Structures are given as structure tokens and as C-alpha cells.
Image (cartoon, rainbow, N blue to C red):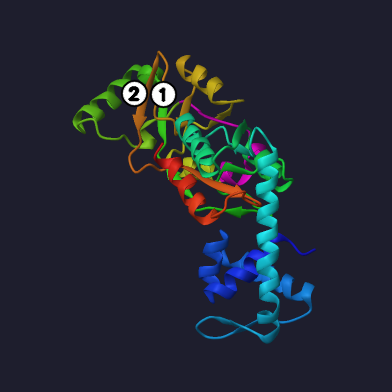
Amino acid sequence: MLTERHLQIFVALAEEQHFGDAARVVGITQPPLSQGLRRLEALVGAKLFERGSTGVELTAAGAALLPFARRALTSIEELHQAAVARDPEGPEIRLGLAPEVPPAAGAAVAAACGAAVPGSRVTVVSAPTSSLTNQVSAGRLTLAVVLHPTVLDGLEAGPVQLLPTWALAPAGLGAGSRARALAAEQSARGGLPVELRRLGGLPVAVRPRAEAPAARDLFLDTLALHRPDGGTVVVTDERAGLAMAAAGQAIVMTADPTLIAPGVERYELAGDPLPTRLRLVWSRTPFAHPIDVIAQLTNALVTP
């Protein structure tokens, strides 16, 4: 089936004459752009570009079809605009956020979505990474912020953003001698971050593996490398983990710089060994200039 994305790839390649530049214009990476071109050439039954060492040039068939592609894209854009004009509430952008996205960062991404499409309605849902990627693939969500790594299964994705992660531990870590040793270490270091291995003894609260298998595996492997003792305990959400930390039963890792509770101490970790890795994923964006908007949304993750 000939799609709008095929036409976008065709026109971008014709104008940029370079795969990398065309991919940036369309808002995708180079491999799916090359795949899209091959599918388009198969659909029209003609070779559209000649590939050279420095770029690409239109073939005779490509030059003949290019005006039709441009007119088709113009018609599609007019259709979108007409649909928006008939919708008194404006277009809807459905944004998914993984539970690990800090509230301020999630709000910043939502605001950036609304600014990118004036008059739009932004609806936000929170769900585990595995659910979000499935919903984006099925078209139920416009885009989502998910944990990395994850199986994309044909989805497009923005760059990975690393958010610093803090440890929330019971005040005194529930053990007098360990607490005194850690307090002395912090004092000696002038309040500098502590080593993750020093926060031993209690299990680290983690969410179920099925929510984000690849990301959970990376987290657990890194945790075991830096902190071989203590183990983990599965919790349903960050709220449950924080309650366990307040009760002296677990340690919580969080990217939320504001999360705290009575009876809980916040520790900055030396070397930030367990950063929260986030990235945007989408199937088809509603943005007129997707590469620029994706860059804005990505920046919103780290500068809310």
C-alpha cells in the first residue's frame, strides 16, 4: 500500500539528494528510510534514484513521478487541515508515559506536544513500557516516553536520554554501625555522592520484569555489578517502594529529584551507575516538521 510516509521519503530524497539528510527531514533514521524507498520502488514498478558515492540522483522515472508525489502530499496536508478545521476541539495528541518518567519531565513533554500543534488536545496515559510500545504500534497512542532498551518492533525512536538516579534509603539504613559509617564517609567526603556498594544490606525495590524486560535486565545486571549483596524485592509501583523504604525494608532508585518521605534519606550515587534511560517512540507523528519537534520533546525530558 502506498502511504504518506512513502511520499515523504520520495520528496525528501529528491530535494536533499542524500540519505542521511533526507532521514533527518522526514524524522526517521536511515535504515527505515532505505526500506521505505525500496518498498516505494516496488509499488511503482520503477527505479526512482541512482545511488552514487556522494548521494543520489533522480532517474527519468523518478523525475516524471516527483510532481505527482508533491501534489499528493499537498492534498494530504489539505485534508489534515480540513479535518482540524471541522474539529472544534482541535486534533488530539495521545501521549504515553512510562511510570519511571519524573512528573516534571512528563509535564514538560506534554506541554511541548501542545505547543508543537497549536489548538491540539493532549491526553496523557501512564502504563509500563511494554504496554506503551504495543499501543503506539496499534495506533492507540501518538507517541510515548519509554524505558531504554526495549524492543521497538518497527517503531521510530529518538535519542536515548540519561536521567540521574538517586537512592532513597531508610533513615540510618536500619543498622546503627552501618549508618554511623556511612554518615562518617559522607562527612569526610564533604557531602559528595556515595558509592552504591555502601548502600548494602537491604533489597532494592524493583517493578515487575514483564513491564520492561530488556530495561529491567540491564538494571539488575548493573546493580549486581556495583552492589553484589542485598538483592531485590518486587513492588507494584514507586509509591509502594517508597512506603517500604520509610518502613526500613527497602531502598528505592528514582529519577524524580523531588521524591522524598519522612523517615527516608536521599543519596546521590557516585558515578551515577544506574541512570534512568528514556527515549521517545512513535509510529507516525502529527507534526509538520517532525525532526524539529522530536528534538524539542527530547530536550523537554531533561530540562523541564
> 285 or 183, which is in the foreground?
285
The residue beneath circle 1 is 169
Which quarter of the figure is the N terminus placed in?
bottom right
Residue 154 in sight from this viewpoint = no
**Which span is picked out in magenta?**
202-217
Kindly report which numbered mark, 1 or 2, lies closer to the viewer in this rendering. Answer: 1
Position of residue 34 relative to residue 128, above or below, is: below
Residue type, label 1: Ala
The residue beneath circle 2 is 178
Q: Secondary structure at mark 2?
A: helix
Q: Is residue 216 magenta?
A: yes
Position of residue 302 relative to residue 200, above or below, is: below
Q: Residue at x 44, y 30 (%)?
A: 256
Q: Residue at x 56, y 49 (%)?
A: 149
Position of residue 293 relative to residue 244, above or below, is: below
Quadrant in which residue 125 is drawn? top right
Quadrant in which residue 61 is drawn? bottom right
Q: What is the crowding at mark 2: few (fewer than 14 residues within 10 Å), some, or many (at least 20)? A: some
Which quarter of the figure is the C terminus placed in?
top left
Q: What is the crowding at mark 1: few (fewer than 14 residues within 10 Å), some, or many (at least 20)? A: many
Q: Position of residue 169 (x, y in %)?
A: 41, 23
